[in-house]
Image (cartoon, coloured by chain):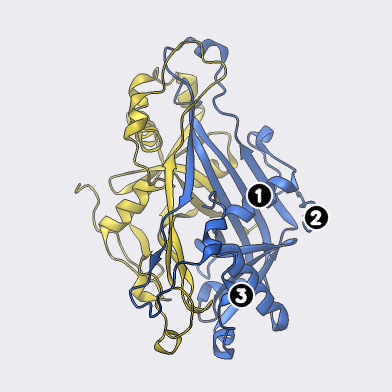
Chain colours: A yellow, B blue
Amino acid sequence: VSDLERPGSTPRTRIRRLPHHAVVDSDALRDILDRGLVAHVGFVGEDGAPYVIPVAYARAGNRMLFHGSTASRTFRALGAGTPACATVTIIEGIVLARSAFESSMNYGSVMVLGRCEVVEGEAKLAALERISEHVAPGRWAELRPPKPQELKATRVLALPLDECSVKVNLDGPDDPPDDLDQPVWAGTVPLRRSWGRPLAAPDLRFDLPPPTYIAGWRADRV
Amino acid sequence: VSDLERPGSTPRTRIRRLPHHAVVDSDALRDILDRGLVAHVGFVGEDGAPYVIPVAYARAGNRMLFHGSTASRTFRALGAGTPACATVTIIEGIVLARSAFESSMNYGSVMVLGRCEVVEGEAKLAALERISEHVAPGRWAELRPPKPQELKATRVLALPLDECSVKVNLDGPDDPPDDLDQPVWAGTVPLRRSWGRPLAAPDLRFDLPPPTYIAGWRADRV
């Protein structure tokens, strides 16, 4: 996949702490964004305070796409171009070092800074399909098309991946030499994900099995 | 557990959209905060833009506790009392409705607004134990105590749960009547978590098995 250009680094996304965890790697950025289900989107409210909201998203090329209600104050503010920060984090496991101080988590995290633009017209429908396919791959093709009033009630936003940082820590414990004789086990406990058995809606009218495409969903979504 | 008082609701945490998803329920708040591993913490930077950072935390009674480096700009700003928003979200599954418009996710999310206070002295050590036990229950007791220079390099912050909102959606599809004859399966695909097999650090010096307390960790952490 070559649809993601090298993400931009600027002084405000340069990672100051633990710079060895900084990654200038489109593959890592793409992997994290393609596995996450929600981004935590921050913006500054009218009262000057920060707000952080979980929002479904998809990555499409060099942009993140979001959808929400046109009645949502958050989506109105974001659609008006207020500065935004969208962060997606995947916890991969717990790192048990020989000290509490060195103990940590394995994780990957992407932080994107910028301003959203409203997506309209044909691009809006394509964006909704992209978000649907990100969350539930295979579903879109078997659903009826969105109705005009549904499209009208939905706002779609795009946030360019121009200014972002990627942090990845998958190294396990990194104890200083004088802790290596501590008489405790050290290592990593991985956090796994999997899809459970699909549960039919109580009001399902047809004797249909769950869609077969669910079996193809990657298990490492979060 | 009766250590959590009823969380406060204020005009700015009142849920305006989809108010039927709002929960004024300390049990739901406690469950979400006790299962999460990181909070996404938002604050307004010196440039006036929002930043959202994943931070390990624990709940202790009516507060969230965070720890980070004293050298971290984020922790300096938060410790100085800049307004903060800490959000913890747990995705429980994908909701496949009969239309893309009604499709969604099952989830629980807690948003806490307020200002952090720096935790010092004996309370600081207790807070570090609490965070360690939140992330890796059972670990603290077998580790050496933190060294003075480790305590000095660590900042501990507390955010009161005075002003927060809880949103929970576990209902599955809720299609309008005229969609119920759509010839598609509808229901929920649960997202499960589990702990993988512990991986020993390559520099482990003793022939120790992984700690037995790992087997007691609840599997629904995220």
On residue A162, the disc is none
Q: Which of the two labelled residues, at mark 3 and mark 2, occupies the earlier sequence position?
A: 2
Identify the image quadrant of residue B131.
bottom right
Q: Is residue B178 left or right of residue B166?
A: left
Q: Secondary structure at mark 2?
A: loop
Q: Residues within 10 Å of mark 3 (few under 14, many from 20)?
A: few
| Residue A121 on image: x %, y % | 36, 29
Q: Secondary structure at mark 1?
A: helix
Are the residues at dot 2 and dot 1 in contact (C-beta closer than 8 Å)? no
Q: Residue sitting at 56 percent across and 49 percent down?
A: B89
Residue under circle 1? B31
- Mark 2 — on which chain does it sit? B
| Residue B127 on image: x %, y % | 66, 73
Q: Secondary structure at mark 3?
A: helix
- Mark 1 — on which chain does it sit? B
Q: Is residue B102 visible?
A: yes
Q: Residue sitting at 66 percent across and 79 percent down?
A: B125
Residue under circle 2? B2
Q: Residues within 10 Å of mark 1 (few under 14, many from 20)?
A: few
Q: Is residue A80 visible?
A: no
Residue under circle 3? B141
Q: Is residue B34 above or below residue A80?
A: below
Residue type (three-letter) at the residue carrying disc 3: Ala
Q: Residue sitting at 53 percent across and 34 percent down?
A: A70
Q: Is residue A90 left or right of residue A99?
A: left
| Residue B128 on image: x %, y % | 62, 74
Q: Nearer the viewer, residue B116 or A152?
A: B116
Q: Which of the two labelled residues, at mark 3 and mark 1, occupies the earlier sequence position?
A: 1
Residue type (three-letter) at the residue carrying disc 2: Ser
